Image: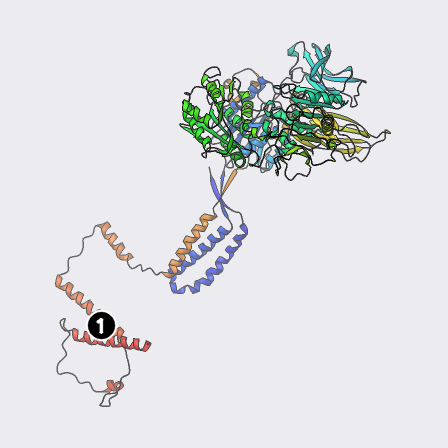
């Protein structure tokens, strides 16, 4: 099934192999001394060595080719397909997998709506889907491209790839055709199974249309566009009866403008309702259709549409006060009303829920309101309302404001011209907070404990200490060091919280004693607070532990949650009462984050400066807010310390306090431009606590009136602008018509615009001129909800506000199957393979039959597991193996050239092996005396050979008789009378001695010559 071959990442290096024959020819003669056999072996090794090195340089790879196939089914789970039809799709996929998959082919399933999720990863088995899809996807949109992209990421590399798209093709997000081209380039084939269904009659409220120039006191026509998708037949005209209701919301109040019985024939119909606006405000209109028979309407989600308009009047101000201290800023509200400002006072338990509710107000005042009264979404709305929509934001001081109110590390702090954290430890005493976690047995206990701990840490300053104790077999700190300074460790603390898994603590005493030891090691902590969240089951602490905590100045607050019974615990209540803390009974876990935010603010109390009266110092007397009030500002008795934003030239510090001296935490009043709006921070209050001496002074009205007016959204301008906004093809289209005072076109304006969508994320909007006095811009409307647009026409012009509401997703607007798109996707041919197929769903799956009862031959004729795609290849680097082999060959080459191996031992060894195999008998033993004789003979032969080799022929002096030794051969030889006896074995020593002496003399002479 698998085959392998070699490939090269750098094949150009293979040209070096051409020198192998040349090197062999040059080396053949030079290696002649090695002998014929060794020479050929060395030549072979050298050629092999060069080949291996060249293959290494060419980055050789092992390429595996196989015929395995991976098929991934993409299953559409969007709301445009009826639930019954979605179940039939699951049955089809299960039956197709059982009948078609074979061998080692893999199969996987991806489900999708707005997004995509893996239901079954690719697996080589006949996997089956459950009747209920386990993966969670948003069904209100269809994104074929997202599903195809996820499938491409899931495919393994060692198999051919095919996608089977089971959908109605009704996409309203992404570009499936573009993604199909990317799949084609990657060699992925696409088969499509179109899902067709009978479309029920559906009534769609298309939109509510308002004229772009609604004016106060002038009547206008409001139009509601309604479509009935039924098809008239001879038996049924397709009429749908029901009620059309129109409501208007303004100033937090909703009124029904009209309600009439209507009969909707098939097609589109427009209802016109005459309206008039008498008061300036932000109006939201909603049209809703109520069918008399629910079965006549397929979807209720598309039975409503909304639109909004803003009628300008006098500047309006929203003042939000703490609902637990009502009337604290009543004096300020009354004095501002006397100056002609429209003030609405709203308690913090009746806050806004949408960004649209903030649009009637030109500025928002946060009057000593703690952070825990706001959700994260509401805080984001306040910041976007200023940054993108141009409204003002003013924060007034108090013990529940700025950093003392827990607003640290929020988007409101980013919008303010000051930081809520104090960087100087010399000014603000440190606080210490310890949290004991024992709430794991409640529903999602670990999740809630992580959330509340993070919210508490966010409220702490950089110099504060924080520690968390949980029970994991024993009581232990979450971070081993115990209590750590928050500033440099905040991110690490947040990360460690995600891995916290506290267990069921049996006893409070060891844990609280551990906390007491941690507090005792912090002599510089001015405020020490302990928070315990528990179900109250552990044994109560000893009285000695409570006494120790009280002596250390530690307050203990407890949150009782219900796990095995109703919330509430006498043990927790007694601990809080004994130490001066707060006892909370929590029946809803959603309230836990606010409780811990409030308790963490106990540690932030030192941020309030109220030691003695101070006289404000004017830092910027020319500013509009201080116009006419710089000479008679009375002293104040307290404020919340903040820090100046470092390195920001937009910040304007207007008033400062002389104390604390020499520090940047003494700002009283600062302002700046934040995006399109303005933000002001006044760190003292408005007369109820720290500025009581101001209320009777003339400067009071001027100071606060000018502060609020400076922050308000600008109004008026020198031109006439009408704005039209609508949703077309998934885009919010904004059209601006610009005229001057003489009704002449305003051309060549440099318009800038920003928008805020339902997700509260800012989006840049490009406005371009398309004709005289006409400017057009658009942005994608991907989610249902309100889109607010703020347009800056140019210098000297007030911002223009517009917007549009997308009441429901396009999934409920267009419910016609898109067979054309599915056929287009299937005809895209993958690289190296044929185009895909359009697979018709067998009629058996449109009947209510169990999937197991459908026969295999009844399935579609097109087999998704057909092997007509190019075989998959999988490459693996192998150059390192060839490099290792070349090293081994190099060693063999050097060994063969430098080392001569004598193979004389081979024949005896072979003979011995042959004898052993043939079991031959050894020869008869040679007599002992013959062995000695042969041994002696061999010894004498060796001695004679050594003498002959060592004999030296040197010239010697003639003897005294004058006979030349060279003539000795011509002299007569005197033979002895009898032949010399043959040497015997017993007389060789005299000759050996003379030979040894001559050898020693020769060696001695050699050494003397060297010296």
* Residues packed near mark 1 inside 10 Å, few (<14), some (14 to 19) or many (20 plus): few
Q: Residue at x 32, y 78 (%)?
A: 1009
468 left or right, relative to 662? left
Instruction: Name the residue nearer the viewer: 625 or 935.
Output: 625
Q: Which residue is mark 1?
A: 944
The percent coordinates of residue 937 (x first, y second) are 18, 68
Instruction: Please indicate, yes or no, whether residue 408 appears anywhere in the rendered image.
Output: yes
Image-based side of 38 in relation to 768, left or right:
left
Between residue 125 and residue 550, name the one nearer to us: 550
Residue 605 in the image, given as x and y percentages of width and height: 56, 28
344 or 132, nearer to the observer: 344
Q: What quarter of the picture does the C terminus occupy?
A: bottom left
Q: Is residue 918 above or below residue 169?
A: below
Residue name at image x 47 percent, y 38 percent: 2
Q: Is residue 862 visible?
A: no
Task: From this view, report whether residue 577 is shown above or below residue 620.
Answer: above
As helix, strand or loop, the secondary structure at mark 1 comes to helix
- Percent across and percent down for residue 125 are 47, 28
Q: Is residue 822 left or right of residue 599?
A: right
Q: Is residue 888 above or below residue 161?
A: below
Work out whether 641 lies above or below 260. below
The colour scheme used to paint the residues is rainbow
- Quadrant of res 774: top right
The number of discs equals 1
Front residue of this view, candidates 533 and 943:
533
Q: Quadrant of residue 906?
A: bottom left
- Residue 16 horizontal/vertical position (percent): 52, 55
Quarter-of-image position of residue 986: bottom left
């Amino acid at each position: 099934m698998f085959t392998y071959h070699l490939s090269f990442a750098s094949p150009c290096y293979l040209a070096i192999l051409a020198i192998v024959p040349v090197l062999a020819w040059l080396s053949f003669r030079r290696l002649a001394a090695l002998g014929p056999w060794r020479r050929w072996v060395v030549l072979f090794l050298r050629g092999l060595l060069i080949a291996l090195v060249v293959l290494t340089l060419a980055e050789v790879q092992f390429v595996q080719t196989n015929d395995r196939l991976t098929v991934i089914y993409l299953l559409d789970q969007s709301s445009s397909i009826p639930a019954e039809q979605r179940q039939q799709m699951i049955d089809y996929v299960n039956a197709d997998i059982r009948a078609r998959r074979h061998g080692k082919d893999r199969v996987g399933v991806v489900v999708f709506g707005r997004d995509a999720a893996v239901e079954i990863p690719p697996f080589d088995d006949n996997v089956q889907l459950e009747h209920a899809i386990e993966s969670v996807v948003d069904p209100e949109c269809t994104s074929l491209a997202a599903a195809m992209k996820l499938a491409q990421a899931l495919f393994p590399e060692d198999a051919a790839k095919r996608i089977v798209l089971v959908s109605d093709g009704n996409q309203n997000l992404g570009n499936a055709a573009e993604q199909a081209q990317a799949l084609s380039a990657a060699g992925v084939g696409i088969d499509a199974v179109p899902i067709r269904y009978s479309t029920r009659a559906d009534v769609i409220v298309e939109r509510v249309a308002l004229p772009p120039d609604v004016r106060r006191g002038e009547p206008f026509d409001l139009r509601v566009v309604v479509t009935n998708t039924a098809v008239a037949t001879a038996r049924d005209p397709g009429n749908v009866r029901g009620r059309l209701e129109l409501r208007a919301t303004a100033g937090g109040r909703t009124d029904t403008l009209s309600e009439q019985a209507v009969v909707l024939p098939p097609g589109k119909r427009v209802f016109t309702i005459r309206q008039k606006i008498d008061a300036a405000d932000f109006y939201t209109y909603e049209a809703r259709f109520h069918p008399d028979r629910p079965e006549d309407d397929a979807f209720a989600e598309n039975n409503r549409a909304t639109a909004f308009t803003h009628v300008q009047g006098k500047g309006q101000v929203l003042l939000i006060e703490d609902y637990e201290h009502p009337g604290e800023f009543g004096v300020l509200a009354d004095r501002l009303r006397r100056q002609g400002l429209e003030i609405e006072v709203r308690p913090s338990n009746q806050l806004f829920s949408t960004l649209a509710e903030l649009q009637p107000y030109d500025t928002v005042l946060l009057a000593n309101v703690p952070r825990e009264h706001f959700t994260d979404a509401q805080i984001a709305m306040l910041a976007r309302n200023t940054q993108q929509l141009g409204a003002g934001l003013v924060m007034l001081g108090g013990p529940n404001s700025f950093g003392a109110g827990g607003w640290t590390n929020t988007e409101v702090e980013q919008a303010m011209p000051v930081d809520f954290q104090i960087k100087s430890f010399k000014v603000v005493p440190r606080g210490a907070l310890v949290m004991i976690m024992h709430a794991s047995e409640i529903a999602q206990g670990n999740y809630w404990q992580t959330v509340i701990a993070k919210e508490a840490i966010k409220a702490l300053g950089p110099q504060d200490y924080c520690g968390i104790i949980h029970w994991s077999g024993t009581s232990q700190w979450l971070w081993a060091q115990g209590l750590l300074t928050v500033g440099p460790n905040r991110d690490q603390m947040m990360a460690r919280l995600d891995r916290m898994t506290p267990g069921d603590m049996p006893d409070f005493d060891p844990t609280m004693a551990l906390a007491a030891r941690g507090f005792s090691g912090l002599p510089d902590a001015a405020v020490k607070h302990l928070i315990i969240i528990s179900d109250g089951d552990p044994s109560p602490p000893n009285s000695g532990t409570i006494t120790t905590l009280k002596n250390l100045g530690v307050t203990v607050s407890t949150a009782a949650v219900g796990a095995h019974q109703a919330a509430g615990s006498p043990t927790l209540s007694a601990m809080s009462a004994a130490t001066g803390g707060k006892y909370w009974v929590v029946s809803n876990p959603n309230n836990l984050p606010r409780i811990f935010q409030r308790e963490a603010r106990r540690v932030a109390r030192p941020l309030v400066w109220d030691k003695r009266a101070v006289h404000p110092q004017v830092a910027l007397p020319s500013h509009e807010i201080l116009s006419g009030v710089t000479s008679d500002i009375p002293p104040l008795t307290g404020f919340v310390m903040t820090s100046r934003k470092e390195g920001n030239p937009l910040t304007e510090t207007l008033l400062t306090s002389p104390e604390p001296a020499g520090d940047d935490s003494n700002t009283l009043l600062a302002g700046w431009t934040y995006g399109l709006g303005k933000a002001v921070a006044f760190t003292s209050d408005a007369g109820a606590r720290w500025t009581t001496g101001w209320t009777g002074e003339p400067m009071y009205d001027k100071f606060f009136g000018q502060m609020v007016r400076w922050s308000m959204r600008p109004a008026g301008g020198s031109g006439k602008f009408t704005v039209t906004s609508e949703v077309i093809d998934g885009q919010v289209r904004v059209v601006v018509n610009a005229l001057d005072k003489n009704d002449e076109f305003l051309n060549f304006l440099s318009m800038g615009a920003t928008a805020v969508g339902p997700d509260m994320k800012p989006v840049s909007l490009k406005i371009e001129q398309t004709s005289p006095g006409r400017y057009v811009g658009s942005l994608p409307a991907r989610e249902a909800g309100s889109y607010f647009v703020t347009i800056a026409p140019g210098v000297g012009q007030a911002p223009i506000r517009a917007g549009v509401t997308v009441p429901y997703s396009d999934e409920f607007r267009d419910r016609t199957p898109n067979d054309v798109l599915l056929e287009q996707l299937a005809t895209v041919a993958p690289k190296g393979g044929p185009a895909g197929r359009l697979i018709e769903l067998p009629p058996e799956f449109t009947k209510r039959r169990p999937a197991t009862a459908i026969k295999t031959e009844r399935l579609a004729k097109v087999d998704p597991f057909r092997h007509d795609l190019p075989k998959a290849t999988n490459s693996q680097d192998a150059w390192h193996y060839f490099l290792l082999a070349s090293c081994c060959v190099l060693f063999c080459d050097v060994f063969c050239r430098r080392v001569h191996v004598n193979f004389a031992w081979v024949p005896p060894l072979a003979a011995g092996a042959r004898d052993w195999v043939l079991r031959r008998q050894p020869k008869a033993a040679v007599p002992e005396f013959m062995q000695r004789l042969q041994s002696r003979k061999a010894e004498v032969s060796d001695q004679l050979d050594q003498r002959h080799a060592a004999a030296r022929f040197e010239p010697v002096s003639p003897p005294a008789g004058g006979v030349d030794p060279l003539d000795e051969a011509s002299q007569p030889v005197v033979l002895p009378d009898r032949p010399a006896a043959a040497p015997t074995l017993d007389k060789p020593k005299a000759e050996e001695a003379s030979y040894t002496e001559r050898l020693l003399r020769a060696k001695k002479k050699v050494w003397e010559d060297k010296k």
